[in-house]
Amino acid sequence: MNKTKRFALLCLVTALFVSIIAGCSGKGSESEPSSSGGSSEPAASATSSDAASASANPFEEHMDISVSWWGIGAAFEGQDEIIQKLEKDFNITFKAMDIGWDNYKEKSQVWAVAGQLPDIITHSITNDQPATYNEWISQELIKPLPDDLSAYPNVQNVAKAEDVQGLYRDGKLFAIPRMTYPNTDLWAIDRAIYVRKDWMEKLGIKDPTSFDEFKAMLKAFTEQDPDGNNKKDTTGITMNTMGYLKNLFIPAFPQFENGGWVKEDGKWIPYFSSKQMDGVVTQARQLYAEGLLDQDFAVQKAGEGNQKFYQNKAGAFAIAASSVGGATGVKAEWEKNNPGENFFDHVKLLHLWPAADGTVYRHTTISWWSETMINAEVDDKKLDRILRVYDWLLSPAGKEMFDYGIEGKDYTKDGDKITVTREKDENGNFVDLKKKYPSMDVISQLAQWRNASSIEDSESNRAALGDDVVQFIQDELKWQMDNAKPIPTEFGIYTMSTPGNDKIQSIDFDDDFTRLILGKEDPVKQWKDIVKGYDSKGLQEAITEVNAEMTKQGK
């Protein structure tokens, strides 16, 4: 990186400091677009006109490619057969650069200032910090993708997705969004409230049909010794992260849950400015003040609240419905702490009650969370190689490997029929591919999240997760499709870039909301004071600019 860029970046650090340490809302938080073509071997077609011309063998030259990912060091350490295959097929060596869920934004910014960004940058600035996305583009830290992506058809599919168009700047795309689901309906199972149905039966509690009934249920879990140990050691509800707890407040204010803008009194405003927040902050404060919400939620790290549910210390648990399966999923962890017990005999999903308009709403959001960006210092030859890797990762052949493992070792194939042959564990279940091949956890999600594959009713999922888990997910998805509607959401505002809208991305809403929950003064007044403070962070400018743009669009 030249000195001018580095100096400019150093000047930005103070202004960006708040935003770089802001937490993510969930893995979501946090799409698997349908991909065309693909084969078991990487394609060797000609590269795009914007990339360097390739030889007859586009993989002839060996390349080192540095890549950042959450926990990548441990995943790549053993050099298992999956990473070996990918590196051999593409004649590359991956150089792992570790990031953590609690520091990836700050660490990436430090790398940017120091001129040490990896070739493949994993981040979530297109979702969480669009102002930083714009800054990195203007500072020439990240490389635009070629205008012609036809040599990489699966990458091109992502680039052409409707809600990705808001990421283009002056006709150029500087990121490959990491898609979560092929359509927004499937987000329905990314939020859920698990509940101890055996505790409900013991205490004579029916499914709540209002917030007051829900609160009464949590109070019973807290005060009526549902686990029968003659101790007052249980709480009402715990959470994986705040992003999942927000699901609970959909009936009070749907757009609060997914961070959308709403049109109120003829004007578009961000959810936190809405008068509908009065109900949310009142309910959230009640849960904490009355001891019904995990009293440690503000200080525990992501995942620590899970253990309270697994260890019978909480009666309800906010996480994703799709998190039920797998070796470290909700079912496995609960059964590990309750040997000899069947998870589904004790736990079910609790469905929320209608909102004020009589509609039951379900979670939805844009089709991706997080993205890959390419370091601007990557030359065109390496860019071509990276895009070829990503195109294969997004292909049917890549999906087959991530679903079944290595052909001839983990499965056999006769036409379209696939037979899983990999070894089983002591319980008679097929060994988890991510345990057998630790690098799979990174490689399978590098180009897109595997959420859609993980919820399919497929032979691979029934073999890996069990019939009961697959049916549990399918039943929940059907219930949501039959009984709930997606939260009304103006997706275009998520990626709309205006000076004011970019500026308010530095607001640490979750931190302010946590302070509100822990507070002592009137919650409605406290929240209005907090939002008033957002004016100094560009709130009114953002509202004016977004409304001007929406008027142009006739909305």
Image (cartoon, grey):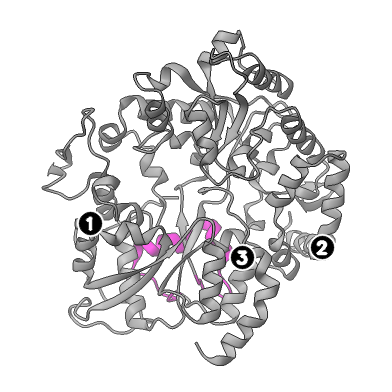
The residue at the far front in this view is 231
The amino acid type found where label 2 is placed reads: Thr
Q: Which residue is mark 1?
A: 82
* Residue 265 can be seen in this image: no
The numbered mark, 2 or 1, whose residue comes first in the sequence reads 1
Residue 544 lies in quadrant: bottom right
Which residue sits at x=13%, y=43%? Answer: 413
CA separation in Å, label 3 and label 2: 25 Å
Q: Is residue 89 left or right of residue 145?
A: left
> Which mark sits nearer the N-terminus, 3 or 2?
3
Q: Position of residue 330 (x, y in %)?
A: 44, 33
Query: How far, Cα to Cα, is label 2 from label 1?
Result: 51 Å
Give the amino acid at mark 1. Answer: Ile
**321 to 490, vertically: above or below:** above
Quarter of the image with the C terminus is bottom right
Residue behind mark 2? 544
Q: Nearer the viewer, mark 2 or mark 1?
A: 1
- Relative to 495, say whether 377 is above or below: below
Question: Which residue shows up at 67% across the image and 82% down it?
Answer: 11
User: How far across and down, in percent of the image, does residue 2 sit?
Assistant: 52, 91
Q: Which residue is pictured at 73% across the width and 35% down the height?
A: 284
**Mark toward the start of the polypeptide (1 vs 3):** 3
Q: Residue at x 22, y 81 (%)?
A: 61
Label 3, residues with CA under 10 Å away: few <14, some 14-19, many ≥20: many
On the rendered structure, is 24 left or right of 117? right
Residue 237 - label: none
Which region is colored magenta?
145-174
Q: Please tell me whether mark 1 sits on a helix, a strand or a loop.
A: helix
Q: CA distance from mark 1 to mark 3?
A: 33 Å
